[in-house]
Each structure stands twice: as structure tokens, then as C-alpha cells.
Image: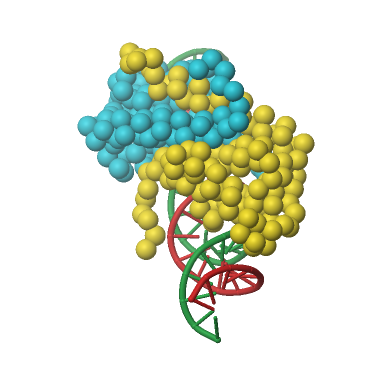
Chain colours: A yellow, B cyan, C red, D green
Amino acid sequence: MPKKGSPPLEGELLQGTLDLLILQTLVLGPAHGHTIAYAIERRSDDVLQVEHGSLYPALHRLEDRAWIASFWGTSENNRKARYYRLTPKGRKQLLHQTSRWDELVRAINRVLRTGKTTVSG
Amino acid sequence: MPKKGSPPLEGELLQGTLDLLILQTLVLGPAHGHTIAYAIERRSDDVLQVEHGSLYPALHRLEDRAWIASFWGTSENNRKARYYRLTPKGRKQLLHQTSRWDELVRAINRVLRTGKTTVSG
DNA sequence: TTCCTTTTAGTAGATGATCTATGGGAGTAC
DNA sequence: GTACTCCCATAGATCATCTACTAAAAGGAA
């Protein structure tokens, strides 16, 4: 049964941020899908969950935009795996999206702090 | 002509945050749609833009969930206007969504700081 | 009255990211 | 050869947002 009417912010991801998270993960070096998802979940202390149904479409659209490139290889577990690496274009995009992310967070936080006294910084 | 293939984070809003922004705006007192949009834009230093096509559907779904309630009144410009106010349920939801927002931002930022030296705390 | 502008509310249709729920191939262990 | 895990992949649905539009009501000009 599909989950009904989950209110905003209740998903496992903030819509629009997965691409950014993937690009950042690949800064550390090439990785395949499974590893990328795992890395994001671990780094976020399991707050973010990356479903396969979100991950692979995201990887494919990033490759379509030439922000990442793929090649076949063999995983640590001796499985055939498609590895992704960051392209120069992707590196530029990462910088761009990171500063856009920061800008949006600052903007939203300005609205959220409206009329409230800041508690503990 | 529709804008083509805008990459993530390039919209005027981060998907999922509009409800939160509206609820927060109404903490200051009842307001009608036009005023709410204007307040969000101003408070965010015009980084966030609230389109009518996003605003009214959002107001209606918030009212459906009983997080806000509406009444007809007269605007500062002597126009008929539908005013919205926060309900007790909405106030609870605001607290909930605010902490969820903070949690997600912290989680994403942990991933984004991967392998980088933290600047200024 | 008619015409035009401003203010405010609203909807229709498209887009696009994410989620649920699958399927399938290829190693590994038994 | 059966079972299990790892890895890739897609179809269909859901839902928020954006573009582009309609429309009502008030005020001013003529």
C-alpha cells in the first residue's frame, strides 16, 4: 500500500539535493551506485536514505548532462559494477550547486528566524 | 515557452519548504495570500520568489490539513481578500517541520563537508 | 456609462524529482 | 543446483512547483 499524503519534508531526501550529494560523494574518487548511496547515508548519520528508485535515475541524468561519466568495473565483492567519476564539468557544477544550496538555506533561515529570539546561537 | 530542463536547486523555491515558510509567516499574525508571498520574498532578500501558481495550491492544502484557517476580509487597499491564520494544529506542525528542516540541513551539510576543512566553525 | 489599471484569487497543464514495487543477472556458499 | 547476496535497472504513481492563463472587484479618467 502506498504511503498516503506525506507532508513536505517528510521524505528521506530534500527534493533537488540528491544530485548535489552524489557529485560531492564522487569528489573522493570513482564509485559505483551501491557505494555512493551507502556513503551518503553514513555521512549523514543515516538521516538521509537513498532509495534505488531515486539513485539510478539520478545517476543517469547526471551522466546525460555530462557531469559524471561511467565505466564498467568490478566491485570489492567481485561483482560487475558500473563506476562513476566526476567530470570537469561536474566539478564546476558541484561548486555552483553548493553555493546555490548555501544561498537557499541562508534565505530560508532568514525567514524562519523572523520574530524569534535566537536560542543558543 | 516553458523553461527547459532546469537542473535541481535552480527553482525559486526548494521543493517542500513552501509550507514551512507560509506557516512561519503567519506566526506574525493573519495575512492574505498577496501579503504572505511578499513577506517571504522580502524576508529572504528576494532570493525566494513565490509564484501564484505555487502559493494558492499551498494555501489550500494547508487549509485542508487544518494547519491554517481562512476568513474573508478587506485588504489594506480596500479589496476583498481571504485572510489566513495559524491554527493550534498548525503551530505544532510548524515546530515539527522546523526541527525536521534543521535536521535535514545538518545532515546534508555533513555530507557536503566531506573531505573539506571546515571554515569558520 | 465605458475603459483601463491595480489588486487579489484562482485553475489547468506540464515538468520533474522521488518513492514503491518490481525483475533480473551474476557471484558465493552449501 | 538451490539459496542468498550484490548490483543494476525500470515502470508507475505521487506530489510540489512553474508557466500561463482567467476573472472579480475597486478606483480613476473620460
Percent coordinates x, y for residue B117 in the rendering: 59, 23
Rendered residue at 53%/48% (across/down): A38
| Image-quadrant location for residue A86 | top right
Percent coordinates x, y for residue A64 in the rendering: 72, 49
Judge by depth and name the residue closer to the eye, D7 or B4: D7
- Image quadrant occupied by the N terminus of chain A: bottom left
- Image quadrant occupied by the C terminus of chain A: top left
Percent coordinates x, y for residue B28 in the rendering: 32, 19
- Residue B68 is left or right of residue D2, and the answer is left
Q: Residue furthest right?
A: A88
Percent coordinates x, y for residue B99 in the rendering: 35, 31
Rendered residue at 55%/52% (across/down): A54
Rendered residue at 58%/39% (across/down): A21
**Count of numbered labels shown in the rendering:** 0
The answer to whether residue A80 of the structure is visible from this angle is yes
- Residue A108 is left or right of residue B97, and the answer is right
